[in-house]
Amino acid sequence: MSFGNVLSILIEERGVTQKELAEACSTSPSAISGYVLNTREPDFDMLRKIAEYFHVSTDYLLEYENASVKSDDEVVRNIVKTMSPGQRSLWIKQGKQLQDYDIRAMEDADNTDH
């Protein structure tokens, strides 16, 4: 599977838009679209930002992850497929809240380092 396919799956599963991802990674929506369509490749810094945003490793994005991690990811996918629309909506909302919390925590840590 290509990087664009992996990214597309993450965007869909996490319920975010390409625009939201672009804003979080300080890039343009057209750049994210290019990655998804496999017409562009991210540089290392962008790859790292995308991995941090989705809380996955860069190896996962590039499909170098070991089989046990992939099987864990498949388990999560199967669980999500069995959720009712209300459960999935709540799961996505909680995921976004955790992301927001992580971002604030990282920003707070950056501000105290200076």
Image: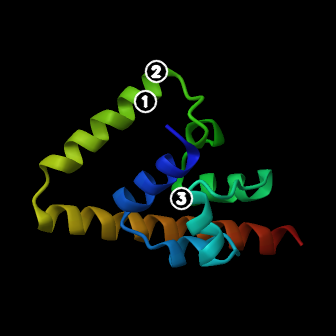
- The structure residue drawn at horizontal position 78% and vertical position 50%, both measured from the top left corner, is 44
Q: Position of residue 1 (x, y in %)?
A: 49, 37
Q: Earlier in the sequence, mark 2 or mark 3?
A: 3
Q: What is the crowding at mark 1: few (fewer than 14 residues within 10 Å), some, or many (at least 20)?
A: some
Left or right of 57? Residue 95 is left
Q: Position of residue 100 (x, y in %)?
A: 51, 72
Left or right of 8? Residue 35 is right
Which residue carries the number 3 mark?
36
Q: Position of residue 59 (x, y in %)?
A: 63, 36
Q: Gap in Å between the C-alphas at discs 2 and 3?
A: 24 Å
Q: Position of residue 27 (x, y in %)?
A: 69, 74
Q: Can residue 23 be seen in this snapshot?
A: no
Quadrant for residue 29, please give it. Answer: bottom right
Q: Is residue 44 above or below residue 84?
A: above
Which residue carries the number 2 mark?
67
Which residue carries the number 1 mark?
70
